[in-house]
């Protein structure tokens, strides 16, 4: 691998840079990426002003964007029913809590062998919500990304006191294997505190509950579901929604985002006082990102893969839109870049990024690319060279 020496230039340029990186899933968090990039930039040029923003649009790292909350630890069960310690945020003065679904029933906490949507459940999430309801929490902000489940939220709802039965009056609680048998719902024992609570659902997808663009077809594979079972499981999900409709005469299954977290969003919408928010928009408004971008020169953003999906509402591109609206430069960092997909973008979308860089500096395996030490070194080298170039052509900046 070719190594480069850092360029030292007299009269270093002054600029203000915002670092706002999405996580590199399975490798580095948004916060970790920001710290690595900041340190590297300062090694090249100490005069550069840096603003860091932790960003997350509902998935992994969602808790990190919030302030004025206490971080707490809670014992519950994960997606396969094993005892686990999880983090959440709470403010008892304002009676608010923030929960990251990925932290509790996330795919990141399971091995490949453990990923089985027929068994994985959202029950552990319900245990935490029930406890917080009892403590007097009235407003919940739920980051829906990164779940390992496809149970339409029956596990969570069961923990809140809603009972689901099969035709033989057996309780159905766990995963697709029991979801498929549900014919009756009993909500007479639901937590009495639930009706006083409201839930803000933060979601980075717009998929409905079922169908070719629904939860099962789009996300089932990454959660361990065999592609040959997609149509079968999708029918189970559709039938469950019919049982719900027959009882409540409400149909949230076609709502954009109802398929988020394996139908967990659908469960919230049907059984609680909930409202959906687009993840990137919620984050941008909460952090007052646009006002901060007006005060910078360069935005450094990015995520694990830069491809056409990046332009479907994901946070880094939404930030880039704001930056270009305010005539700022945008540098995009990614673990991989799919050029053939990017070539198909409209000219307007192509113009959102001034320069994009993959951090890989040689041919390596996916396992190596996801190694924190290797990824950290690759990011450092990439940022070092980017800012040396900016120094060399400072008159153009």
Image (spheres, rainbow, N blue to C red):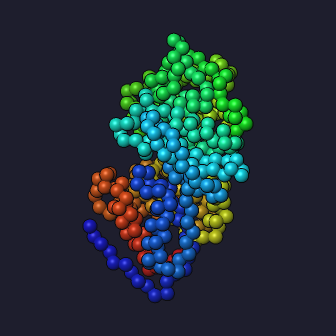
Relative to residue 18, is residue 230 depicted above or below?
above
Q: Position of residue 70 (x, y in %)?
A: 61, 55
On the rendered structure, is 245 left or right of 299?
A: right
Name the spot of residue 393 as percent of width and height, x first.
46, 78
Near-viewer residue (48 or 151): 151
Residue 300 placement (x, y as % from top left): 51, 64
Residue drawn where x is 32% and y is 75% of the image = 4
Residue 219 visible in the displayed image: no
Q: The N terminus is located in which quarter?
A: bottom left
Instruction: State whether residue 172 is above or below residue 378.
Output: above
Pick whichever, 102 or 291, lies toward us: 102
Name the residue located 40 percent from the left edge and 32 percent from the top edge.
116
Taking the spot 61% from the left edge, 36% from the top edge, the residue there is 130
Residue found at x 56% / y 21%: 164
Asked where in the image residue 190 lies, by quadrant, the reply is: top right
Q: Position of residue 275 (x, y in %)?
A: 67, 39
């Amino acid at each position: 691998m070719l190594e480069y020496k850092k360029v030292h230039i007299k009269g270093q340029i002054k600029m203000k840079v915002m670092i706002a990186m999405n996580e590199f899933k399975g490798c580095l968090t948004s916060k970790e990426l920001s710290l690595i990039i900041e340190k590297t930039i300062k090694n090249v040029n100490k005069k550069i002003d840096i603003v860091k923003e932790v960003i997350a649009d509902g998935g992994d790292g969602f808790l990190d964007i919030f302030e004025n909350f206490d971080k707490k630890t809670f014992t519950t069960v994960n997606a396969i029913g094993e005892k686990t310690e999880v983090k959440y945020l709470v403010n008892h003065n304002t009676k608010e809590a923030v929960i990251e679904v990925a932290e509790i029933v996330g795919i990141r906490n399971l091995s490949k062998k453990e990923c089985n949507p027929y068994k994985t459940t959202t029950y552990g999430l319900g245990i935490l919500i029930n406890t917080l309801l009892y403590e007097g929490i009235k407003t919940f902000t739920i980051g829906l990304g990164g779940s390992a489940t496809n149970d339409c939220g029956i596990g969570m709802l069961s923990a809140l006191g809603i009972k689901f039965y099969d035709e033989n009056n057996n309780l159905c609680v766990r995963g697709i294997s029991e979801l498929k048998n549900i014919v009756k719902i009993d909500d007479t024992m639901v937590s009495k505190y639930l009706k006083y609570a409201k839930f803000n659902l933060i979601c980075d997808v717009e998929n409905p509950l079922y169908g070719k663009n629904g939860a099962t077809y789009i996300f089932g594979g990454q959660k361990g579901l065999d592609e040959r079972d997609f149509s079968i499981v999708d029918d189970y999900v559709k039938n469950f929604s019919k049982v719900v409709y027959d009882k409540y005469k409400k149909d949230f299954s076609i709502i954009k985002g109802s398929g988020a977290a394996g139908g967990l969003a659908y469960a919230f919408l049907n059984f609680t006082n909930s409202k959906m928010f687009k993840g990137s928009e919620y984050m941008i408004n909460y952090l007052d990102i646009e006002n901060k971008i007006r005060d910078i020169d360069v935005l450094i953003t990015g995520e694990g893969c830069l491809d056409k999906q990046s332009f479907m509402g994901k946070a880094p591109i939404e930030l880039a839109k704001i930056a270009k609206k305010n005539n700022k430069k945008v540098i995009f960092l990614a673990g991989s870049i799919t050029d053939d997909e990017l070539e198909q973008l409209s000219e307007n979308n192509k113009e959102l990024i001034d320069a994009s860089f993959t951090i890989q500096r040689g041919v390596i395996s996916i396992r190596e690319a996801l190694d924190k030490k290797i990824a950290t070194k690759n990011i450092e080298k990439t940022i070092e060279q980017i800012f040396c170039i900016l120094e060399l052509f400072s008159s153009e900046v």
